[in-house]
């Protein structure tokens, strides 16, 4: 089939690879514009653009895709596929061709922009992937394919994203084959929808007055992006990995438990162990080494 693909980040790149591996022709890729990244604010291309360019696929970058319908109408495609695209498609766009959306949750659960992060923030043990027909109301379309996936206690955003992307390839390939053979069946979503929200930088600040499971959910979901952190004397410490400490003592939130082998911070009726971090000077360290360099440290901000 001739497919128009819309997506930008790594999740979308893996889905695009799967479409090509299944033998479909991608006539063009539409992705977000290059964005400033890191401290140097150097422009960085979306992962999809870099991959598509290497494959010789035409790449179109639009800040507002709905303003470029005349250009898109000139493309010869059978249907379009979206995966982590990040823009709302207009009624006029949706009327061009059949559109499929790859959504990493068990719709109608976790509709919206951050289903992977939200599943981890909520310490869910199961999520999944839905291939749905594109509708104007976000993530409300009829379901073509859906399958659940267990979330491991060791999963963080990167590992869960990879698992969900690979499952997406499997389900999308299956769905496209059904469409080609005229055997596709779309069914309405059932159940009460839940919704996710955009993640902001301040969502990464650890609140040690919460239970340790809440803090751990933040680390698993947000340490990769936008970053998870706490402060010591006004200086930011970024947390990369953590785990819940054994529950065998009384706790006073924000206090540090002096333990030469572990960096433990007390939470509400629990404690969390900081396994690895980025210190205020930018050095990646294990938690124990960092704590040993902070001899008079008793609490975090």
Image (tube, rainbow, N blue to C red):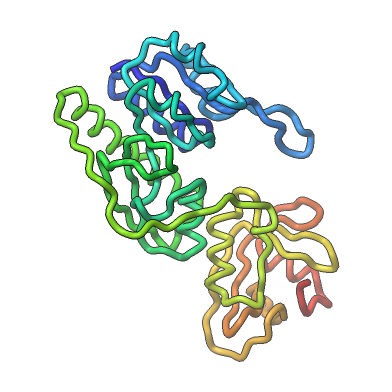
Front-lying residue, 199 or 149: 199
Indicate whether 286 appears above or below 48.
below
Instruction: Give the x, y percent position of residue 198.
Output: 58, 50
Write the residue at 65% across / 26% down: 34
Write the residue at 58% across / 62% down: 218
Q: Is residue 291 left or right of residue 152?
A: right
Q: How many marks?
A: 0
> Which image quadrant for residue 231?
bottom right
Q: Quadrant of the C terminus?
A: bottom right
Write the residue at 66% across / 74% down: 208
Front-lying residue, 222 or 272: 222
Q: Quadrant of the N terminus?
A: top left
Instruction: Give the x, y percent position of residue 8.
Output: 52, 31
Indicate whether 69 appears above or below 182.
above
Front-lying residue, 72 or 161: 72
Indicate whether 102 appears above or below 90.
below
State the residue lying farthest toward the front: 91
Instruction: Give the x, y percent position of residue 63.
Output: 62, 26
Write the residue at 19% across / 29% down: 178
Q: Is residue 176 left or right of residue 53?
A: left
Instruction: Give the x, y percent position of residue 12.
Output: 46, 33
Indicate whether 112 appears above or below 168.
below
């Amino acid at each position: 089939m001739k497919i128009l693909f819309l997506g930008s980040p790594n999740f979308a790149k893996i889905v695009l690879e799967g479409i090509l591996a299944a033998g479909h022709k991608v006539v063009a890729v539409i992705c977000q514009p290059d964005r400033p990244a890191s401290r140097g604010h150097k422009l960085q291309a979306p992962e999809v653009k870099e991959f598509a360019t290497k494959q010789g696929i035409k790449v179109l970058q639009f800040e507002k895709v709905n303003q470029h319908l005349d250009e898109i109408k000139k493309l010869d495609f059978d249907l379009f596929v979206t995966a982590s695209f990040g823009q709302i498609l207009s009624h006029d766009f949706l009327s061009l061709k059949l559109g499929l959306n790859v959504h990493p949750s068990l719709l109608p659960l976790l509709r919206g922009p951050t289903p992977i992060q939200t599943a981890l923030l909520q310490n869910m043990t199961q999520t999944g992937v839905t291939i749905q027909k594109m509708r104007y109301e976000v993530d409300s379309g009829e379901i073509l394919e859906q399958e659940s996936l267990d979330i491991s206690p060791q999963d963080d955003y990167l590992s869960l994203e990879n698992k969900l992307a690979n499952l997406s390839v499997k389900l999308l390939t299956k769905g496209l084959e059904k469409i080609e053979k005229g055997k596709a069946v779309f069914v309405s979503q059932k159940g009460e929808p839940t919704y996710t929200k955009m993640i902001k930088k301040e969502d990464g600040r650890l609140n040690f007055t919460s239970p340790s499971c809440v803090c751990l959910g933040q680390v698993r979901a947000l340490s990769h992006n936008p970053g998870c952190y706490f402060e010591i004397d006004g200086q930011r410490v970024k947390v990369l990995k953590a785990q819940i400490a054994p529950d065998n003592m009384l706790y006073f939130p924000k206090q540090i438990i002096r333990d030469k082998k572990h960096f433990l911070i007390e939470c509400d009726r629990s404690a969390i162990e900081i396994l690895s971090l980025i210190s205020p000077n930018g050095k990646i360290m294990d938690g124990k080494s960092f704590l040993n360099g902070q001899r008079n440290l008793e609490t975090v901000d």
